[in-house]
């Protein structure tokens, strides 16, 4: 396993061009260290700012999110609702194995998003914006979405790629996380959930990286990249790279910035996602057996053409 390259913030400037031209991840040490959130975002502070608001949050039978260790789709993507203060209690008290069952992400409630030149801010989470900054590492007019993440120790985000086609800048605000990444060219060896199958999470691998089983494991020949983030660090994840996070801190807070690449990024993952997006745009019924079989055939043919050989 190779370590992701690390640099200081001043070395990363030449900003958008340096990241846009990279085809590998990069850790920018202390890239968010000056943000007020680094000191402020304790559970106590957040409870005071957001405690009464009603939120949805992920739940799991284990530490895995989504919870592909269970058999039902309802269990895989389970959520609960409640006050933010209650969520903070769940991730902050009790055994680590229990605390890891809960996770809040922008899937439930985005922080900010920009579509067709229009910017929307979630009013309930808007107070968080005063404590963070948009890094000057990409063209702000290409900003697509901002998410906030909160968790306790031990959470594992399942191996996946971001299906929005965006570059990803992950800002570690509190706690620590470890990320393992794989290049898009290795998708065929990552065993993604098949198109036309019963699981709609086509951007996720079937591999449980913590409990590999039989053929469902990462091939030893595949190059893995590893990065450990401390509070104040930024991790650049290029568009379409597969990744999985392990949440190491007692209390973890992150902010994600996704932005559209300046130039087309085309690879096996992008082509596969284009098929998924085209089916959705055409409003095809993927439960129709004929359509499902066609999707499976396209997927199998694409994954057989392994660019790694």
Image: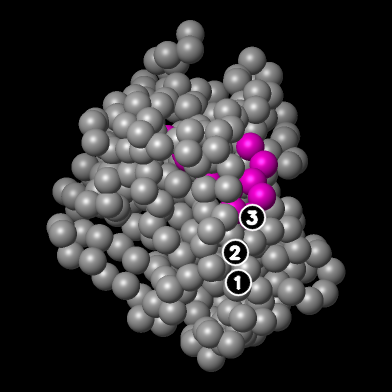
The span from disc 3 to disc 2 (Cα, nearest Å) is 7 Å
x, y percentage for residue 183? 49, 26
| In-image side of 183 versus 44 (left or right) | left
Give the camera-side residue of 37 and 55. Answer: 37
The structure residue drawn at horizontal position 33% and vertical position 51%, both measured from the top left corner, is 287
Give the camera-side residue of 170 and 30. Answer: 30
As displayed, is residue 140 above or below residue 304?
Answer: below
Per the image, the residue denoted by label 1 is 41
- In magenta, the rendered stretch is 227-240
Classify mark 1: helix, strand or loop.
loop
Mark drawn on residue 231 = 3
Per the image, the residue denoted by label 2 is 38
Q: Is residue 293 visible to us here?
A: no
Do the CB atoms of the residues marked 3 and 2 lie less than 8 Å apart? yes
Give the camera-side residue of 47 and 275. Answer: 47
Numbered label tally: 3
Do the CB atoms of the residues marked 1 and 2 lie less than 8 Å apart? yes
Give the camera-side residue of 31 and 197. Answer: 31
């Amino acid at each position: 396993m190779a370590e992701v390259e690390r640099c200081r913030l001043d070395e990363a400037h030449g900003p958008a061009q340096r990241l846009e031209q990279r085809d590998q991840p990069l850790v920018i040490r202390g890239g968010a260290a000056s943000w007020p959130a680094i000191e402020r975002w304790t559970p106590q502070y957040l409870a005071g700012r957001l405690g009464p608001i009603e939120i949805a949050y992920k739940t799991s039978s284990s530490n895995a999110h989504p919870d592909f260790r269970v058999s039902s789709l309802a269990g895989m993507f389970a959520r609960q609702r409640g006050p933010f203060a209650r969520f903070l209690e769940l991730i902050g008290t009790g055994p680590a194995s229990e605390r890891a069952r809960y996770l809040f992400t922008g899937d439930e409630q985005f922080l900010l998003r920009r579509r067709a030149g229009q910017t929307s801010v979630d009013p309930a989470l808007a107070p968080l914006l005063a404590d963070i900054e948009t890094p000057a590492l990409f063209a702000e007019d290409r900003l697509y979405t901002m998410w906030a993440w909160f968790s306790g120790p031990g959470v594992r985000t399942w191996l996946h790629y971001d299906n929005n086609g965006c570059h990803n800048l992950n800002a570690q605000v509190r706690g620590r996380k470890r990320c393992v990444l794989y290049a898009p060219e290795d998708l065929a060896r990552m065993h993604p959930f098949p198109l036309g199958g019963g699981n709609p999470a086509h951007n996720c691998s079937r591999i449980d990286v913590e409990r590999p089983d039989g053929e469902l494991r990462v091939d030893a020949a595949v190059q893995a990249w590893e990065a450990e983030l401390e509070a104040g660090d930024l991790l650049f994840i290029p568009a379409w790279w597969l990744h999985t996070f392990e949440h190491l801190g007692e209390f973890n807070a992150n902010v994600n910035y996704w932005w559209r690449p300046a130039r087309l990024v085309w690879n096996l993952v992008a082509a596969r996602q284009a098929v998924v997006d085209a089916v959705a745009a055409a409003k095809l019924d993927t439960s129709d057996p004929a359509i499902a079989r066609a999707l499976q055939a396209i997927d199998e043919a694409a994954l057989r053409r392994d660019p790694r050989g």
